[in-house]
Image: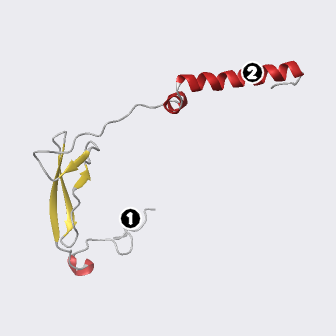
């Protein structure tokens, strides 16, 4: 036996086209165009009362974009990953590192002579 047809099957309460009568009027808007260094053009919509920012991230490539089409901002310089050793070398000179190493080795040797167990 087939089920009876239901005209609203698959829809929910309140579903349907909403016009401005139900939502209210849309706020007045301004369209602002931003340009990135990859020649992407992004149009962003803001409310009329809102101040448009000077820069915006390009939605296509993620680079910074500006309002000036002739001089878009350059891509930021990405520094490679630094290891812990690289950070230590920035803080210590070679002579300081040698002194610290000599102190640590002397301490270990003195502990061995004293018979301490070192793990």
Do the residues bearing badges 2 and 1 touch, measured as CB atoms within 8 Å? no
State the SS at label 2. Answer: helix
Does residue 98 appear to the left or right of 64 in the view shown? Answer: right
Q: Residue at 25% x, 53% y: name it.
A: 56
Q: Residues within 10 Å of mark 1 (few under 14, many from 20)?
A: few
State the mark number for residue 106.
2
Q: Residues within 10 Å of mark 2 (few under 14, many from 20)?
A: few
Whole-number angstrom distance, CA of label 2 to CA of label 1: 80 Å
Residue 111 is tagged as none
Left or right? Give the position of 10 relative to 42. Answer: right
Residue shown at 22% from the left, 75% from the top: 19
Q: Quadrant of residue 32?
A: bottom left
In which quadrant of the rendered view does residue 9 lie?
Answer: bottom left
- Which one is in front, 22 or 25? 25
Q: Which residue occupies the foreground of this view, 113 or 15?
A: 113
Q: In this view, does 112 lie to the left or right of 11?
A: right
Query: Mark 1 highlights which residue?
Result: 10
Q: Is label 2 or label 1 in front?
A: 2
Residue 112 position within the rendered picture, expressed as x and y whole percent measured from the top left: 84, 20
* Secondary element type, mark 1: loop
Above or below 24: residue 80: above
Image quadrant occupied by the C terminus: top right
Q: In this view, does 34 lie to the left or right of 87?
A: left
């Amino acid at each position: 036996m087939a089920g009876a047809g239901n005209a609203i099957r698959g829809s929910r309460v309140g579903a349907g086209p909403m016009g401005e009568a139900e939502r209210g009027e849309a706020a007045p808007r301004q369209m602002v165009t931003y340009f990135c260094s990859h020649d992407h053009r992004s149009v962003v919509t803001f409310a009329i009362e809102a101040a448009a920012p000077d820069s915006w991230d390009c939605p296509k490539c993620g680079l910074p974009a500006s309002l000036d089409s002739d001089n878009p901002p350059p891509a930021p310089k990405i520094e490679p990953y630094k290891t812990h050793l690289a950070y230590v070398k920035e803080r210590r000179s070679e002579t300081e590192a040698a002194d610290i190493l000599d102190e640590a080795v002397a301490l270990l040797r003195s502990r061995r002579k004293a018979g301490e167990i070192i793990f």
